[in-house]
Amino acid sequence: MDSGPGRFPGGTEIAAVQAEQIRHVLVVGAGLGGLRTVEALRSNGYDGRISLVGAERHLPYDRPPLSKQLLAGTWEADRVTLRAADGYDDLGIRTYLGTRAVGWQPGRVELDDGATLHADAVVVATGVVARTLPGLPDTAHTLRTLDDSLALRTALDEASSLAVVGAGFVGAEVASAARDRGIDVTVLEALSVPFARALGEQLGGLCGRLLVESGARLRTGVGIEGFDGDTLLLADGDRVTADVTLVGIGAEPQLGWLSGSGIDVTRGLVCDAAGRVEGIDGLWAVGDVAAWWDDVLDRPVRREHWTSTVEQAAIVGATIAGGEPPAAGVPYFWSDQFGLKVQLFGRPEPATRHVALHGDGLDGGPVKGTVVGLLRDDTLVAVAGFGAARRVARYRALVGAGASVAEVEEMARSLA
């Protein structure tokens, strides 16, 4: 019985019957979400055909290190690979790397080499592409792929100055890596504080302090008017010139190949809580492209976070294979910057107030060690931490349980 988009349609027995009818699963997108979906299919006993299509020539690799260890030069490219090349034989799949999907019709996907693949279930895991700016010169960088990271690393090897447009995850982490090299950094952010959309104004201000205290120049509330060669023209009339320019202004779901299919992709692919694309039989989505139904927020939500992708892949793989899907966990993201880890457990969107749990960052003290509870009235909806990983993790269960402010304060006292 299917009683709504947030429920798993049918029961285990029905799912098992459906799984028997699925003899070929086609996964479009050879990144974290695509590979973990394939692994989940096999670990749940699926023994049919699996094909994995990836636009990049590389085997699936992990993206978080691209703006961290790989960019810093402490890792080389082979360390970001998610699975050794001979491990794909163990999975019994056929890979189509360096091949893009260009079209979809029910039960089939068209590729850019002219081939058409037919499948009983198609899983979309194509991820996102970096946003750019009009007139962006070819010498400017974005950071989304392995090749992007290596190109930026090479450019920074010869640079003494860096201009970063956007102070979100990518911008802050690249600025951190550049400051570690002694490079002069200017960060330009259109919003009033960094991370305002992800963390809100108050906590975003702490991220801004990390940038400034590292020695970077941070300019907020500033727009980009255009470019004069490699020089950035700001909306207030100023000009910024640097040896290297990085644009890190977010990303967009990579769904252009579905534009002629009749599927609405304006909000990503809207899915139920098991990853089925709304209104489309045999089509599933995981990762950055997928807006999954969130029972807590009572709406579809698209989360561009590593842990969400892994959890969604596990659910989709189990569901298609007729296995028992794992329960969804508490949403989580992290960012490594300026020698500490910024973390958030939960859903900050409905928060109406903050409460300081540890540290003095909100009062102008050190950012490191600050832990903040985000509450909707008197109910805990999220916890954010700055260089306080062990303490933050202790609040995860309370976030999942929707603990009261009294329970949160009791935990804070026990951890003092």
Image (cartoon, rainbow, N blue to C red):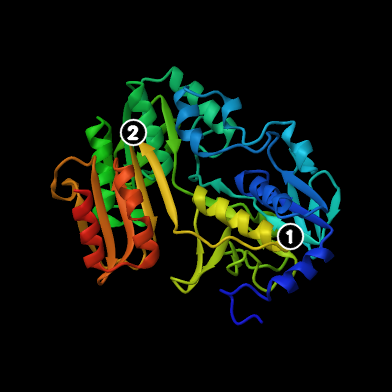
Q: Who's the residue at 84% across and 58% down the image?
A: 23
The mark closer to the camera, 1 or 2, is: 1
Percent across and percent down for residue 325 are 62, 62
Dot 1: within a 10 Å radius of its alpha carbon, few (fewer than 14), some, or many (20 or more) residues? Answer: many
Q: Who's the residue at 36% across and 49% down the image?
A: 393
Q: Nearer the viewer, residue 19 or 407?
A: 407
Disc on res. 199:
none
Question: In this rendering, would 110 be left or right of 158?
Answer: right
Secondary structure beneath label 2: strand
The answer to whether residue 195 shows anywhere in this view is no
- Answer with the quarter of the image where residue 248 lies: top left
Percent across and percent down for residue 229 are 45, 31
From the viewer's perspective, is residue 377 above or below residue 336? below
Percent across and percent down for residue 195 are 34, 50
Question: In this rendering, would 148 be left or right of 72?
Answer: right
Question: In this rendering, would 264 be left or right of 334?
Answer: right
In the rendered structure, which disc, 1 or 2, sits on the residue that comes first in sequence?
A: 2
The answer to whether residue 387 shows anywhere in this view is yes
From the viewer's perspective, is residue 201 above or below residue 402? above
Dot 2: within a 10 Å radius of its alpha carbon, few (fewer than 14), some, or many (20 or more) residues? Answer: some
Marks 1 and 2 in Cβ contact (< 8 Å): no
**Count of numbered marks:** 2
Percent across and percent down for residue 91 are 76, 42
- Answer with the quarter of the image where residue 255 lies: bottom right
- Answer with the quarter of the image where residue 113 lies: top right
Q: Nearer the viewer, residue 343 or 187?
A: 343
Q: Nearer the viewer, residue 235 or 249?
A: 249
Q: Who's the residue at 68% across and 47% down the image?
A: 39
Q: Who's the residue at 27% across and 52% down the image?
A: 203
Secondary structure beneath label 1: helix
Q: Which residue is mark 1?
A: 321
Q: Which residue is mark 2?
A: 240
